[in-house]
Image (spheres, rainbow, N blue to C red):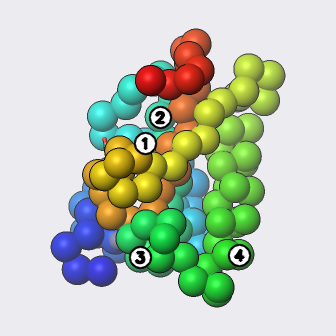
Amino acid sequence: MQGCVFCRIVNREIPADVVYEDDHILAFRDINPVAPVHILLIPKKHIPTLFDLGEGDVQVLGQLHKAAVQVARDQGLEERGFRLVTNCLEGGGQVVPHVHYHLLAGRNLKWPPG
Ligand code: 5GP
Ligand code: ZN
C-alpha cells in the first residue's frame, strides 16, 4: 500500500536489515531496538491491523509464526527463548498500521510488560 512504511520496506523502496524472507513473510531488525534482539516479522501483504484479517489471511499468521521460530533459531535463542508480541491499534501501542510481530530477546524481559 502506497505510503505504508512496511510496504515500502517489502518493495525495497527504503532500506532495512533483512534477516529472513520467503514468499509471504519478511523479517528485519527494528530501527529503534528495545532489546539486544529486536526483529519485526510482517506479512508481505498489507493488512492494517489484526481486526482486518480475512478468512484467507489466517494461513499467513501460521507462516509468520513458523518464520519467527526460524529467526529465533538463527539468532541462537533456542536455549534462552524469546518473546513474540503484536500491538493492535492505538490502545495496544500500534504505531505502524501494517500487521507486525516483535521478536524480542537478549535481556531479561519482565512480565507483565507494563
Ligand atoms: P508498533 O508500535 O507499531 O507495534 O511498532 C512499530 C515498530 O516499527 C517500532 O518498534 C519502530 O521502531 C519500528 N519502525 C518504524 N519505522 C521503521 C522503519 O522505517 N524501519 C524499521 N526497521 N523499523 C521501523
Ligand atoms: Zn503496508
- Of the image marks 2 and 3, the number of the one nearer the N terminus: 2
Q: Is residue 79 above or below residue 66?
A: above
Q: Residue at x 38, y 65 (%)?
A: 98
Queried on whether the Cβ of the residue with tag 1 lies below 8 angstroms from ligand 1, the answer reads yes
Q: Quadrant of residue 99?
A: bottom left
Q: Quadrant of residue 104?
A: top right
Q: Residue furthest bottom?
A: 56
User: Residue 90, image x and y in percent?
Assistant: 31, 52
Give the crowd class for mark 3: few <14, some 14-19, many >=20 residues within 10 Å.
some
- Of the image marks 1 and 2, the number of the one nearer the N terminus: 1
Say which amino acid is labelled 1: Arg
SS for callout 3: loop
- Of the image marks 4 and 3, the number of the one nearer the N terminus: 3
Say which amino acid is labelled 2: His
Residue on which the image places disc 3: 46
- Which mark is drawn over residue 39? none
Queried on whether the Cβ of the residue with tag 2 lies below 8 angstroms from ligand 1, the answer reads yes
Quarter holding the C terminus is top left
Marks 1/2 in contact by CB < 8 Å: the verdict is yes
Queried on whether the Cβ of the residue with tag 3 lies below 8 angstroms from ligand 2, the answer reads yes
Residue on which the image places disc 1: 29
Foreground: 114 or 19?
114
Residue on which the image places disc 2: 38
